[in-house]
Amino acid sequence: MDFNWLHRYASPMNFYSWSLAATPWLGAASAVLFAVGLAGGLIHAPPDYQQGESFRIIYVHVPSAWMSLFIYMVMVSAGTLGLVWHVKLGDMIARACAPIGAWFTFLALATGSLWGKPMWGTYWVWDARLTSELILLFLYLGYIALQGAIEDRRIAARAGAILALVGTVNIPIIHYSVEWWNTLHQGPTVTKFDSPSIDTSMLIPLLVMGLAYTFYFCTVVLIRTRCEILELERNTTWVKQRALEMGSV
Amino acid sequence: MGTEFFAMGGYAFYVWGSYGLSAVILIANAILPRIREKSLLNRIARGYSED
């Protein structure tokens, strides 16, 4: 297969230009979606008939958990592009994904814990869902540690991509854990094949928050990838020129 | 929106705790890479290119 087109569009120089133009729009879209989602989730949605006001934690917990899985898949895909087709930008995107993914995983665990205490009576249980999500956090941290430990960037990227690829088995385990094992964690309410078991007034803010988090991730991953590009290509003419032109971005 | 809103039906600590924590981490994660990019550009402009 001919991947020349991919190498051209994924050249760090082209990527830098279009991502610089895209981030303000993505960031603004994310801010608007956050405003709408928060108003919907905190004010318009009625309290839950069983959980009362505590259910509102869903609007920060579930999007974080979605992102922790989604970012992992982006990281694996980008890493594989680098590993198999030697797309340098793939390695850079994968590297940029890891800390964001780790923070979202941490947030999913922490907000889940804050939800678990009033509803289950405990901050933590060693059940399948919580444990597999904790393993996801360790996969992200392992990837980051690997990047820090290996001096040669290409070897670090290759090792990271392989680690991420192997860790992919954990993703379906997290998703299906609430169906395969007995757990305190509630089952899926949105991604069921029949209609979701959540009222529209509660569902819409959740979907809006999900979009807000997705746009947020796109914004931040582009900025972080640009930092990777600047560090790796700092000796190239185009980066030096850029830096001189935009010393004040 | 009054004290009732902030009380969150007695779950204020858990609800505002998760929203507050999320806000702090998301805002920091948006600002810090931006600062890093600026300082990288500045350093490169000042001739930082040694390996």
Image (cartoon, coloured by chain):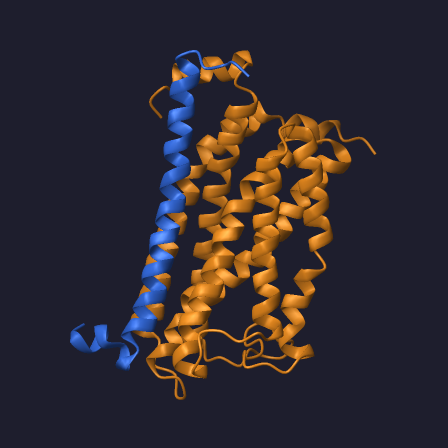
* Residue at the image position 72 percent from the left and 49 percent from the top: A165
Q: Position of residue B5 (x, y in %)?
A: 22, 74
Q: Residue at x 59, y 75 (%)?
A: A127
Question: Is B9 above or below relative to A67?
Answer: below
Quadrant in the picture for the C terminus of chain B: top right
Asked whether residue A93 is in view, the answer is no
**Residue A21 is at least partly visible in this image:** yes
Chain letter tied to blue: B
Choose between A141 and A8: the one closer to the eye.
Answer: A141
The residue at the far front in this view is A149
Report x, y in % for residue A101.
53, 51
Can you name the residue that lies furthest to the right here? A1
* Horizontal side of residue A126 vs A86, given as left or right: left
- Horizontally, residue A143 falls left or right of residue A166, namely left
Chain shown orange: that is: A
* Percent x, y of residue A221: 50, 41
At x 36%, y 19%, the residue is A247
Q: Is residue A71 left or right of A111 when viewed as pictured?
A: right
Q: Nearer the viewer, residue A208 or A230?
A: A230
Q: Picture quarter containing residue A229?
A: top right
Looking at this rendering, what residue extends furthest in the bottom direction?
A50
Q: Nearer the viewer, residue A151 or A244?
A: A151
Q: Is residue A33 above or below residue A174?
A: above
The quarter of the rendered structure image containing the N terminus of chain B is bottom left
Write down the quadrant of residue B42 in the picture: top left
